[in-house]
């Protein structure tokens, strides 16, 4: 079955305002949003739905406090694989998808192939997780940096 691609609409300043507001206040009601962008509720709701349907909004989520959940340790780890073919990358990528303690993974250019963010309750747990990662087929090297103070951590995009 061929999926119908929804055309991407041109965004005007009201659409941009809606995106700015809901990325910071995802639980805002439509009535409050409409008031903030100077629209009545129905047109505001239609624009919001159109932004969702056209893919500008991927998801709604809650940002949890890692420290309150006893997960204060963050380790940024560069991962090098033995090869770049699918046989080498597939086990690593499947592993990353299967564990919840890797919260970010990017394929990068440079001295390593990927960078991952590993979350842990303490250094011992971080060490155990690095050992699990080291055992994944195709992984040949890890280089980690441990965060000692988080200055900024946001998923909010700079919408101009």
Image (cartoon, rainbow, N blue to C red):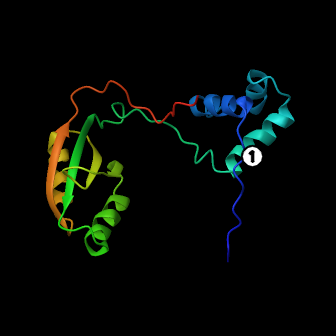
Name the side, left or right, on which 60 lies relative to 66.
right
Residue 42 drawn above or below residue 136 = above
Q: Residue at x 40, y 32 (%)?
A: 65
Coordinates of residue 81 in the picture (x, y in percent): 20, 63
Residue at point 70% right, 44% down? 51
- The answer to which quarter of the image holds residue 61 is top right
Q: How many marks?
A: 1
Classify 131 as above or below 9.
below
- Residue that appears at 32% across and 70% down: 90
Q: Is residue 80 left or right of residue 101?
A: left
Q: Position of residue 20 (x, y in %)?
A: 61, 29
Packing grade of label 1 (10 A; few <14, some 14-19, many >=20) is: some
Quadrant in the rendering for residue 132: bottom left
| Residue 109 located left or right of residue 144 | right
Q: Quadrant of residue 107?
A: bottom left
Residue denoted by label 1? 50
* Callout 1: SS: helix
Please state the horizontal and vertical placement of residue 7, each as a whole percent of the image: 72, 55
Left or right of 80? Residue 104 is: right
**Quadrant placement of the C terminus:** top right
Question: What residue appears at the point 64 percent right and 28 percent down from the top-left corner?
Answer: 21
Q: Residue 69 appears at what percent x and percent y?
A: 36, 36
Work out whether 135 lies above or below 154.
below
Quadrant, the N terminus: bottom right
Placement of 15 over or under 8, stated as above or below? above
Q: From the viewer's side, name the closer residue of 159 and 102.
A: 159
Q: Nearer the viewer, residue 65 or 38?
A: 38
């Amino acid at each position: 079955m061929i999926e119908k691609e929804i055309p991407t609409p041109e965004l005007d300043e009201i659409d941009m305002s809606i995106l700015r507001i809901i990325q910071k206040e995802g639980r805002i009601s439509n009535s409050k949003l409409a008031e903030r962008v100077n629209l009545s509720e129905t047109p505001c709701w239609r624009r919001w739905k159109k932004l969702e349907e056209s893919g500008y909004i991927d998801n709604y989520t809650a940002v949890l406090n890692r420290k309150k959940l006893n997960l204060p340790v963050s380790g940024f780890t560069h991962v090098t694989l033995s090869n770049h073919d699918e046989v080498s990358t597939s086990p690593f990528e499947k592993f990353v998808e299967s564990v919840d303690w890797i919260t970010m993974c990017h394929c990068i250019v440079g001295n390593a192939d990927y960078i991952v963010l590993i979350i842990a309750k303490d250094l011992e747990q971080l060490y155990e997780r690095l050992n699990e990662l080291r055992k994944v087929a195709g992984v040949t090297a890890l280089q980690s940096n441990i965060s000692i103070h988080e200055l900024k951590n946001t998923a909010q995009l700079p919408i101009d």
